[in-house]
């Protein structure tokens, strides 16, 4: 009987039917998050102000309630401008724009260049798609990033990965870089859009391009154990829906997997890296 009712509703009232399906999907995802919440969660301290030489990390930017088609960066643009003197870099972990365009990419690049600020992008599926195609070509017209991209500091290494083309995973070159640059004095940070670890996959906004099996944190930990001071994998594909947190974190000794992203909520969080530590900041 419910099946026949669903068919009739789909035929007679397609909008109501779609809303009904959306509610069902939302309740299923909410149930999955409540019942698959990972153990070994880690606490991240919160900042009230941005310290000098902060690395600012923004995930799923287009989900912020201040963003619109007319104002595609929302209040983030003012926030970056007002805090320019305290920013060492701005890192976008994907899904910057819901509907990217050549104009939007140029405006983003121009805005950050005028501020003379270093910026990096780990692209998301909304930014470049999940295959080679027009969206990725458009992105490459504006930016000359090559992935994986490596930036080295005195006691830190940043690696920026494009997981959209690698099916939610690292490519071989990234794994090789992790192996070659190991040092017990260095903290390694790898930035991705997609959540690469199975332990946090419940928190992913989208399942577009997701493989049947994801990497286990234990596997990567076995590769990097005792080789770095700490290793943090920071992803930007979470937080889009009101039943999701804006940040989730899983810890395995000195390996941290963190997902962070904006959604349509009153308070959203960005991440800040400062002096080999990770903090959150409410925006």
Image (tube, grey):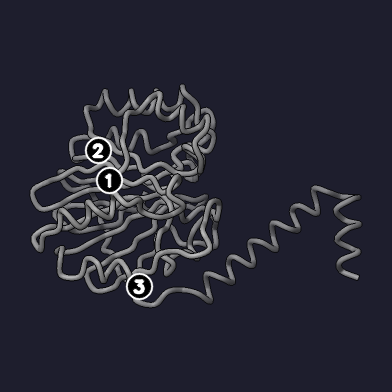
Residue 54 in picture, x, y percent from top left: 20, 46
Measured Cα–Cα span from mark 1 to mark 3: 22 Å
Q: Nearer the viewer, mark 2 or mark 1?
A: 1
Label pair 1/3, CB-CB below 8 angstroms? no
Residue 225 in picture, x, y percent from top left: 20, 70
Q: Earlier in the sequence, mark 1 or mark 3?
A: 3
Instruction: Name the residue rendered at 35%, 73% in the picture.
Output: 41
Q: Earlier in the sequence, mark 3 or mark 2?
A: 3
- What residue does disc 2 label? 83
Note whether 137 is above or below 96 in the view shown: above
Name the quadrant containing residue 7.
bottom right
- The reply, left or right, for residue 185 in relation to residue 200 is left
Tag 1, which secondary structure? strand
- What residue does disc 3 label? 41
Note whether 51 is above or below 32 in the view shown: above
Label pair 2/1, CB-CB below 8 angstroms? yes
Instruction: Name the residue rendered at 32%, 72% in the picture.
Output: 218
In this rendered view, identify the residue nearer to me: 143 or 71. 143
Residue 111 in picture, x, y percent from top left: 33, 26
Note whether 23 is above or below 153 in the view shown: below
- What residue does disc 1 label? 56
In this rendered view, identify the residue nearer to me: 35 or 209. 209
Residue 119 in picture, x, y percent from top left: 27, 36
Instruction: Name the residue rendered at 22%, 55% in the picture.
Output: 178
Badge 2 local density, few (<14 within 10 Å), some, or many (20+)? some
Tag 3, which secondary structure? loop
Badge 1 local density, few (<14 within 10 Å), some, or many (20+)? many
The quadrant of the picture occupied by the N terminus is bottom right
In this rendered view, identify the residue nearer to me: 195 or 136. 136
Note whether 91 is above or below 106 in the view shown: below
């Amino acid at each position: 009987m419910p099946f026949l009712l669903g068919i009739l509703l789909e035929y007679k009232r397609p909008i109501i039917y779609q809303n009904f399906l959306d509610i069902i999907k939302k309740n299923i995802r909410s149930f999955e998050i409540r019942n698959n919440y990972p153990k070994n969660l880690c606490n991240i301290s919160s900042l009230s102000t941005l310290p000098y030489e902060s690395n600012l990390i923004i995930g799923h930017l287009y989900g912020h309630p201040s963003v619109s088609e007319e104002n595609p960066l929302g209040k983030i643009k003012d926030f970056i401008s007002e805090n320019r003197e305290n920013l060492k870099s701005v890192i976008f972990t994907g899904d910057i724009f819901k509907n990217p365009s050549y104009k939007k990419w140029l405006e983003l690049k121009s805005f950050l260049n005028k501020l003379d600020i270093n910026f990096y992008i780990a692209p998301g599926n909304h930014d470049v798609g999940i295959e080679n195609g027009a969206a990725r070509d458009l992105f490459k017209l504006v930016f000359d990033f090559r992935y994986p991209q490596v930036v080295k500091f005195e006691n830190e290494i940043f690696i920026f990965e494009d997981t959209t083309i690698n099916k939610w995973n690292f490519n071989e070159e990234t794994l090789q870089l992790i192996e070659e640059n190991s040092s017990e004095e260095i903290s390694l940070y790898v930035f991705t859009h997609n959540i690469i670890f199975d332990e946090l996959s419940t928190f992913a906004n989208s399942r577009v391009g997701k493989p049947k099996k994801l990497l286990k944190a234990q596997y990567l930990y076995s590769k990097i154990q005792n080789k770095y001071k700490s290793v943090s994998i920071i992803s930007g594909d979470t937080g889009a829906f009101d039943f999701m947190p804006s940040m989730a974190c899983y810890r395995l000794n000195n390996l941290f997997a963190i997902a962070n992203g904006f959604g349509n909520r009153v308070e959203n969080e960005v991440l800040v890296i400062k002096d080999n530590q990770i903090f959150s900041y409410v925006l």
